[in-house]
Image (spheres, rainbow, N blue to C red):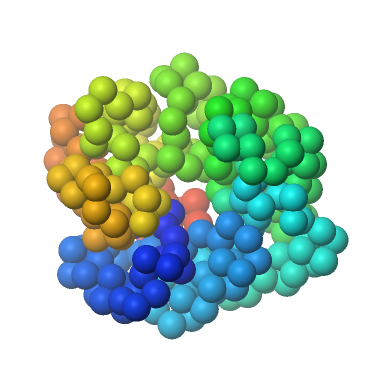
């Protein structure tokens, strides 16, 4: 299985990251993309990717951290994006739920990073919370020049999912899909597997039956099992198709074959 989005640089894993990755390997999680939220976590993601063969890195500035984005930040991101184990820019976007950075700053930094992704020609990982229509509009402005886009931990409904798919963008689903009355479950049942990826967002959003505990990449199998149940197909088929989608998205096809 492919965990397309997690944060193993988080303090929760500081003492046991090697064990967490070993557990993931034992559970069948063969590839993990660690996602940056600022320069510190982006550098840490690269360090993890260089330590562990299963791991790759994404680098970027989360909307919570947009207030710290400067020209120097962009210069370093440009350099980091050209590091061999880096496979995407992210996570970037808009978060109007917590509003930890002013909204005009979030918008400006979102545009700036999408422009950077357009120049570098790399995939983009999008974070959106309570700002879908505006975020989708901003992405649409840049879409012609972007190579690939995924809306991570997609929390909108089926109508919004169709808009994303129609635009040629991907959707990823995580532990929330296992929760009772989850809108994400409706989307996972609806979305074609070739537009869908699986994630944990570890250490957050732990799936049932481990909800309330720290999430980890080994638990992506519970997401896979739930999607299979929703679609009434085998978990093996979900794994096969979503793995293919993720490795194509992150341009890892040569690593794992056709």
Instruction: Pick whichever, 201 or 238, lies toward us.
Output: 201
> x%, y% of residue 95?
60, 37
Quarter that holds the C terminus: bottom left
**In the picture provided, is 239 more to the left or to the right than 255?**
left
Q: In percent of the image, x 46 and y 76: which residue is there?
A: 48
For residue 108, which quarter of the picture? top right
Residue 153 appearing in the image: yes
Query: Residue 126, relative to residue 243: is it above or below?
Result: above
Residue 113: image x %, image y %?
Answer: 73, 50
Identify which residue is drawn at 47% across, 17% down: 159
Quarter of the figure with residue 39: bottom right
Q: Residue furthest bottom?
A: 51
- Residue at 36 percent across and 56 percent down: it is 203
> Measured from the top left, where is residue 183 in percent x and y?
34, 24
> Which of the pair 57/11 is nearer the observer?
11
Q: Nearer the viewer, residue 45 or 191?
A: 45
* Farthest-out residue, right: 71
Measured as percent of width and height from the top left, residue 215 is found at 30, 55
Q: Is residue 160 left or right of residue 237?
A: right
Q: Is residue 213 left or right of residue 149?
A: left
């Amino acid at each position: 299985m492919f965990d397309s989005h997690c944060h193993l640089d988080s303090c929760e894993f500081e003492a046991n990251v090697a064990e967490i990755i070993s557990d993931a390997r034992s559970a069948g999680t063969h590839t993990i993309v660690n996602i940056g939220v600022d320069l510190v976590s982006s550098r840490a993601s690269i360090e993890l990717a260089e330590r562990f063969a299963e791991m790759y890195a994404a680098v970027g500035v989360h909307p919570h951290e947009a207030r710290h984005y400067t020209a120097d930040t962009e210069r370093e991101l440009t350099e980091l994006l050209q590091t061999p184990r880096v496979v995407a820019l992210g996570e970037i976007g808009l978060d109007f739920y917590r509003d930890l950075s002013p909204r005009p700053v979030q918008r400006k930094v979102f545009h700036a990073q999408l422009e950077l992704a357009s120049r570098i020609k790399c995939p983009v990982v999008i974070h959106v919370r309570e700002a879908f229509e505006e975020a989708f509009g901003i992405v649409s402005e840049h879409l012609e020049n972007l190579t690939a886009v995924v809306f991570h931990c997609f929390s909108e409904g089926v109508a919004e999912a169709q808009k994303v798919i129609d635009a040629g963008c991907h959707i990823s689903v995580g532990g929330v899909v296992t929760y009772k009355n989850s809108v994400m479950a409706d989307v996972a049942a609806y979305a074609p597997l070739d537009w869908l990826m699986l994630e944990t967002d570890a250490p957050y959003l732990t799936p049932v039956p481990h909800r309330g505990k720290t999430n980890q990449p080994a638990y992506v199998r519970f997401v896979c099992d739930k999607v299979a149940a929703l679609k009434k197909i085998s978990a093996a088929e979900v794994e096969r198709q979503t793995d293919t989608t993720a490795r194509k998205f992150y341009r890892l096809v040569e690593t794992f074959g056709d």
